[in-house]
Image (cartoon, grey):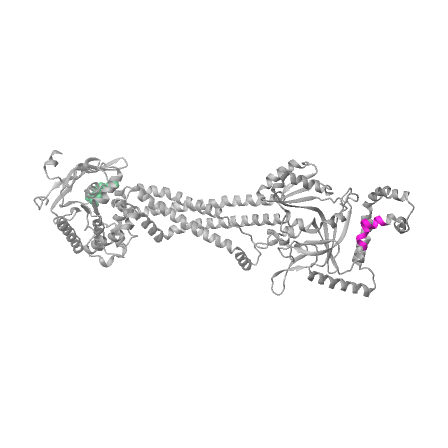
Amino acid sequence: MYKSLLCLRYLRTRYIALASIISMTLGVATMIVVNSVMDGFSTDMRDRLRGILADVIVETNSLDGEPNTQDLKDRIQRAVGNDIEGMTATVEIYAMLSVQYGSQWQSKPVTLIGIDPATKATVGPLSKYLVNTSEASIPDWELSPTAMAYRKEWTTRAQWMVDRWNHNPPPMEEEVTLVEKPDSAEPLAPPKFDSEPASESPFDSKPLVAEDTESLSNPFDKELKASVFDKFDKAEKRDPGSPLKGRVYIGYGLVSFPYEDPDTGETKMFQIVKPGDDVKISTVTAGRPPEPVHFNATVIDLFKSEMSEHDSSLVFCNLEYLQEMRNMIDPESDERSITSIQIKLKNPEDAAMVVSKLEEALPAGQRFRVRTWEDKQGPLLAAVEVESAILNVLLFLIIAVAGFGILAIFFMITLEKTRDIGILKALGASSNGIMSIFLSYGLALGLVGSGVGVIVGLLFVKYINQIEKFITFITGRKVFDQRIYYFPEIATHVEPMMVFWVAFGAMVIAVLASILPARKAARFHPVESLRYE
Amino acid sequence: MTETISMPQPQLAAIAVEKAYRKDKHKIPVLHGIDVEVNKGEFLSIVGQSGSGKSTLMHLFGLLDTPDVGEIYLEGQQIDDLPEHARDQIRNHVFGFIFQFYHLLPELNLLENVLSPLMIRYSTWEYWKKRKQFKQDALEIIEKVGLSHRIKHRPSELSGGEMQRAAIARALIAKPQILLADEPTGNLDSSTGKEIMDLLTNLNEQEQLTIIMVTHDNLIAAQAHRTVRLREGQIEVLGKSKIASVPA
Ligand SMILES: Nc1ncnc2c1ncn2[C@@H]1O[C@H](COP(=O)(O)OP(=O)(O)O)[C@@H](O)[C@H]1O
Ligand SMILES: [Mg+2]
């Protein structure tokens, strides 16, 4: 009884001891903040990476892609079908995005991903990141009514301008058409000639029917038209207000940039492209050697994952059109090539196991590469992990230093309490009883220290963005710059077990630090203690 | 030992006790061959110069220290060689201590100080169950020493006389058989000292409490039944016992 009473009284009357645990409190708080922020970064990053890149990706080594899509899918199904929740075939290729702003063209390198939104939705929550698409709906390649109206408005105006200057096709379209015609016609030449003998047989055998005259007279022209020029013809013929055949979701970071409002001093985003606008994309065709290819595409929606790396590098395009433009469609079998298959797993933790199974099932190292999303961003996540490990060690050393502080203060307190220890012994207290006073005192200090630390840490984590704003306001410098840190806000994730272990570790250190002084106190000889004045 | 059977047994006895302190290699002999005994209900005072070993003897009686040679008997039982746990128990149950410098615990108020021997005796749970009874007892004893108006005060807020009376209350709460008082008036002015002495003699007379009191003041010592003098580590018997025999 006297133990807890005295322990409490010492706690209340000796604030200097509380000072000794301030470094412990700070250590605990910092550890919680650091771990939460690091963890939040990794967790958020993982979520977003998964949303965009899926859990496991099977990629072809060549940019030409794999024509036998169904076979590849079957093999994947056979190997790991039970673990798969969804998969989607994509074409991934480097490209150049050109956007007109005012009278000036801006070009940026991008990763162009041809997707099928319906199957893509089974792999990752793409619609979640599309600005003008509701999260629940499956995104498609249609313009929203507002975007449609906007498009009508600007195309009409452009048409009016064109008419007014009596200048037939708008200069931008003409330029493209001119460049594209000869370029894209070139690689197509061989298949065209190859197919000629096939078409020759009916040619030879038959006396011609009247309706066929046209095709007979110029089969060359018809082939060419069907394969390449068709789209341009159509584009020219279609209603200028309706979207082009190429449709894209563009990363928000590619078409917007921050600027400082001169009046308020606030940083705002300036957007140069809206859904309904057209952009130009240049990439290469499949085949040897790759040839450049250009096409125009209508922006259907903007894509904003809040991960600046993706937002400023990804362009999603309708898969069929991209395959068409890249000559990935076999003219005979109509087989369409793809370059990668994104797979979503039922349990993302199985990724490593699925990868090894897939590597076995697919001709390893030759045509395919199997990777997890983690591999793709592995170095970054690994760096974060190493960093947080180092920080944890350093911060735990701070707590250990706090432990020595407690040790020193406790020695002082036991010295100060020598006489009282003698009194207690004279009154019949046992050595163990005396020891437990100081041990529980240490434990109580540890509890207070780590408890306050936990509270401070959690509050800091909760209000970290407000704190960041405040510091930014005071110092006038952005502490957490989105361009460096991927996310617009500091992401945090509090792992309860982490909090528990940090608090527990701090308490263990406090108790360990009080063992030595407590034992010393217990061994005081009562007579000598009583003489102590 | 045959004597102790035939004669009325002394309640507490020191037999041929020797004690020396060791300072580095030097041996400082303090007590050489002390025989003192006290009967139940007796008020014994021990006088001697400062440094003559009075406190040392008290500590030996109270089991706060062990004699180098010789034995301490309580009711005919040797107690100086008991294991530590048993010695702690005897200190708590049998002896009440009063010190020259009061030795109250500064963090506790008067009431808590008085209750501290009971807090030490009982576990938290047992103490909690009986706390009302204990508080009742403590208040009674505090009233007896005349400090009822001071129960919430800390020792630092009390005068010397009040502190000593609080210490007496603390010594009494555990219902000890023997009160060991080491210069209880040593730090007090004469009138306050007289109050304390009145309190002690009252306790001895009314409750038959055995008291061993150490003092260097012959006048104070004279209020006891019997006085022994310590000189050069040995006992010099002075006065005869004022009471012929132990009231049984
Ligand atoms: N712990 C100790 N170490 C060495 N000498 C001591 C110690 N305690 C007491 N002494 C010596 O023993 C002698 C007796 O002390 P004490 O019993 O306190 O005398 P008194 O109470 O009669 O004044 C003194 O000379 C003192 O210096
Ligand atoms: Mg003394």
Q: Does residue B84 lie above or below A309 as drawn?
A: above
Quadrant of image for the N terminus of chain B: top left
Residue A237 versus residue B38: which sits nearer the camera?
Answer: A237
Q: Position of residue B199 (x, y in %)?
A: 16, 53
Can residue A68 be seen in this snapshot?
Answer: yes
Residue A289 versus residue A132: which sits nearer the camera?
Answer: A132
Q: Does residue A191 lie above or below A137 as drawn?
A: above
What main secondary structure does the magenta stretch of the protein show?
helix
> Which region shows up in magenta?
A222-233
Total label count?
A: 0
Task: Decide if residue A491 is on the left or right side of residue B123.
Answer: right
Residue A502 versus residue A61: which sits nearer the camera?
Answer: A61
Can residue A532 be seen in this snapshot?
Answer: no
Q: Position of residue A466 (x, y in %)?
A: 53, 58
Image quadrant of ligand 1 equals top left
Find out whether residue A85 is within the magenta segment: no
Q: Position of residue B11 (x, y in %)?
A: 15, 41
Find the residue positioned furthest to the top.
B2
Task: Decide if residue A56 is on the left or right side of residue A433.
Answer: right
Quadrant of image for the C terminus of chain B: top left
Find the residue positioned furthest to the left.
B244
Find out whether residue A231 is within the magenta segment: yes
Q: Position of residue A332 (x, y in %)?
A: 79, 43
